[in-house]
Image: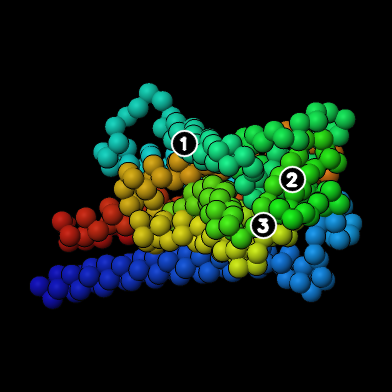
Amino acid sequence: MSGQASNLSDLFDDHDHDHDHGTEDSDGVVLAKGTAMAVLFCASMICGLIPLFLARKLRWVSAAEATDMKSKNRVIMILLSFGGGVLLSTTFLHVVPEVDEGIQYLQEKGKIGELDFSLAQLLMCCGFFIMYLVEEIVHMYIHYREKKNGRNAPLVRNLSVRRSRASSEGKENGDKSVTTSTADLIDPASIIKGKDIEINGQGMHSHSHSHGHGHSHMPVTSSDDVTSALRGLLIVLALSIHELFEGLAVGLESSTAHVWYMLGAVSAHKLVIAFCIGVELIATRTKTWVAVIYITTFAIVSPFGIGMGLVLVGGDSAAASGVYSVVLQGLASGTLLYVIFFEIWKNDRTGILQYIAAIFGFALMFGLKLLTGHSHSHSHDEIQSHSHSHSHDVGHGHSHN
């Protein structure tokens, strides 16, 4: 009898130890996600405000007064290409396999039936097309407002930073305003076109001639201030849509190492975009308080996405939290795919340096993946092992750990 009592005591001690260990791990993941939210927000704010700070300190009144910005624009393009390589590696070597593992886990638990197709890839494609549709709707509304008011909205550009090497001998259609992705909503390349800015009694009118087809207007009359601010905010929100899903991808991770891994991947391109927005706000001479609102809006969406993931799954994996979390993670992977090919690597080439930067970004995240791969390979096994051990401990009075 005493031996059985001792075994029973050891059983509960082991179970309590496993539970405490799991709680500590979960708390660590929650803490990592909270830290990631703060870091991503602060870093995005800093990168976005740096151009505004420099504009004040260096007395940058207009884009024309910035020096050597063409070479800096090339640097920005290379950094974005690096971010594209980072996201490509993250999407196909981390997020999609994790979604696939989550689906397999749910199928083993009977929550998802056996399918004749790959659900992970289908979810990724759905996320891609959802993002495509949302952006097209936003752009339709923006251009409808432009036609209705007879002018372009602030921040709208036909040229993105990724297209700044387009030939200047091409089309001269300065009055055409058609954007096809949120990449077209910011244009750091405009800072090398600033000498074409004209200021008259009606407002500021900025033309782009260096690349052949950029054109923007930014009325500065007091009656248009509110309308312009609201339009610019809408455009920044459109630019921020995929950032929300990227944050969600971070928030749905199940281990501390994976949270930091995804944070690095998202930051690699978000911080560059934040800087680009700040530069563009200088070029359009946006009021300081309006610019701060734009930058804050862009900076906060990714942390908000992380917070959404944290609320949904806490410190557990997406699979352990149910079908909806795995579905959201799959949709987020499609968003990353959209960002890579429609935002970063779209219709431009800056030479071999861009290629090298992309390869370097891919290789860097692949190396980090190898370092964190061990913990990832056991994440779902640990969930299954804990569940299996708990059920047998209660049902049979002994542990299989």
Residue located at (47% from left, 64% from top)? 33
Image location (x, y in percent) of residue 59 = 82, 70
User: From the image, which quarter does the C terminus lie in?
Assistant: bottom left
Residue where numbered disc 2 is placed: 161
User: From the image, which quarter does the N terminus lie in?
Assistant: bottom left
Query: For residue 8, which numbered disc appears in the image?
Result: none
- Amino acid beneath label 3: Val
Please say if the residues under marks 3 and 2 sit with CB atoms less than 8 Å apart: no
Which type of secondary structure does the marked residue at label 3 adopt? Answer: loop
- Amino acid beneath label 2: Val
**In terms of image quadrants, where is residue 233?**
bottom right
Image location (x, y in percent) of residue 210 = 85, 41
Which type of secondary structure does the marked residue at label 1 adopt? Answer: helix
Q: How is the image coloured?
A: rainbow
Give the left or right position of residue 97, taking residue 59 as reference. Answer: left
Closer to the eye: label 1 or 2: 2
Asked if residue 220 shows in the view, the reply is yes
Mark 1 surroundings within 10 Å by alpha-carbon count, few (fewer than 14), some (14 through 19), many (20 or more): some
Closer to the eye: label 3 or 1: 3
Image location (x, y in percent) of residue 205 = 75, 49
Query: For residue 220, which numbered disc appears in the image?
Result: 3
Query: For residue 130, which numbered disc appears in the image?
Result: 1
**In terms of image quadrants, where is residue 356?**
top right
Residue located at (13% from left, 76% from top)? 2
